[in-house]
Image (spheres, helix red, strand yellow):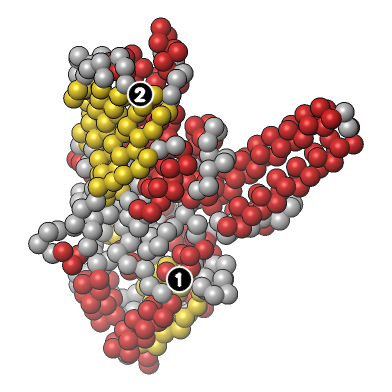
Amino acid sequence: MLLTITYTGKDTENLGYLLYKNPYRPQVFELNYGKAYVFYPEVSGERTTAALLLDIDPIDLARGKVGSSGGGLFDYVNDRPYVSSSFMSTAISKVYGTAMTGRADAHQELSDSPLDLEATITMLPCRGARDKLETVFEPLGYSVSYESFILDEAFPSWGESSYVNLTISGNIRLRDLLKHLFVLIPVFDRQKHYWIGSDEVEKLLRLGEDWLPDHPEKEYITGRYLNRRRSLVNMAFERLAASDEADSTADDEMDGAADGEQDGAADGEQDGAADGETNDAAGTENLNFEADESGETAEREKKMSLKDQRLGSVIAALKNSNAKSVIDFGCGEGSLLRLLVKERQFTKIAGMDVSAAALERANSKLKLNRVGVNEDGRVELFHSSLTYKDARFSGYDAACVIEVIEHLDAPRLNAFERVLFEFARPPLIVLTTPNKEYNTNYAFLHDDDMRHGDHRFEWTRAEFREWAAKTADRFGYTVQFSEVGETDETHGAPTQQGVFRLENNK
């Protein structure tokens, strides 16, 4: 992955002073996930280019050193070492950190001045969001151009690649350019390598304080940067709204003082506060995040996230079936398993996953290695694949497939169906998958974006019901449908669930 920054004008070799990197000496920086190289392909009085090249070690990623949250084959076959992803953003912070602060010692005047700068980001992930390149970068004062590619020249029907070589140029301070790149590269990268927590909210607001509050795409930028984490996006917008309200109040007080009208200042303060609340509510509504004035709704949503609602619905279906033994296909780190072990109704519990690393984390969270925790062998974890027949899949009263099927390649669905419905053949199957129609409620998703970078497809309600009914009929099951999560009158709920029951238990 490569980032180049070009300065054109007069005495452009001074770019080295601003970046704190000698143009005549290549430098190497050790990172947790590989190495970063800084060098200058061209240096002259009229044009100087600095290049930041990342060499990512895919073995380190696969071993779980950094960023291997995908699990299974994804750890070994992915785009992480080759594209300008969130890894590039963190490298900018590490390598150009001083330049981002704007400190330049003897060249402070140059650092404080707008310069004719051009940045090229090679292979930027841009799946379903190309039109956002202009709407995100142009309001910041950049001219935007990009180069796109055909996926495979031998198969033009496959269409264009989801990666672009992006070039932005403008008359801007170097520190601002670096801050914009740091924030906006992860906005276009859906598979971030780092944990998204409240510290990322602080980072976003700190680096975006001069431009984010007034940006026309602030909902999109905030939502994508924070990886669609509802609580964090709400937190960011509350802070932005509070900042807007404070600014509005200050302006109104100054205007009132200038006019010598104390009552007018008070009225202006109230109007400004009301406007701030209205704008905040509008922004929140656009993101489909609702909260009442007391904060009770937000607190309830925090306590009962969509994931919790989904797992609760699955547990309810299992308990209502009187199942005693349950297997969780694609158990991941064991979120469902941890709930199952709390229910004494389930005397035999198994979790299977294609990712050995995920199973290790599940084992740790379930504390199965502790003395006395699993002496009766009630819980079993094993490594396998849902697209291959495995004798260990059989013999359970119920099977769960929670947010898993959408990670399978469509050509492998037939194998999955036979493995689950024909060979394992449990009396009860509970399966959930995202409702594609509901994606329109997420402002941070655009066009055909999917909710996760590893999703191979997402079904509408009609598509899911058609597949489920056909599969149930083919293998002797009946199926009942339900939806999980807040329901939109037009697009349904975010999660759709099918409960399959074996007819006559045969």
At x 40%, y 47%, the residue is: 134
Q: Identify the residue position indicated by label 1 in the image.
A: 437
Alpha-carbon distance for marks 1 and 2? Answer: 42 Å
At x 24%, y 35%, the residue is: 2
In this picture, is 93 found above or below 76? above
Name the residue type under label 1.
Answer: Glu
Q: Residues within 10 Å of mark 1 (few under 14, many from 20)?
A: some
In this picture, is 220 found above or below 457? above
Measuring from the top left, give residue 85's x and y in whole percent: 31, 42
Quadrant of residue 173 within the rendered picture = top left
Left or right side of 367 for 456? left
Measuring from the top left, give residue 190's x and y in whole percent: 37, 50
Name the residue type under label 2.
Answer: Tyr
Left or right side of 238 for 457? left
Measuring from the top left, give residue 360's x and y in whole percent: 32, 49
Q: Residues within 10 Å of mark 2 (few under 14, many from 20)?
A: some
Label 1: which secondary element: helix
Q: Kindly tell me whether residue 341 is visible in this rendering.
A: no
Q: Identify the residue position indicated by label 2 in the image.
A: 96
**Labels 1 and 2: the sequence-earlier one:** 2
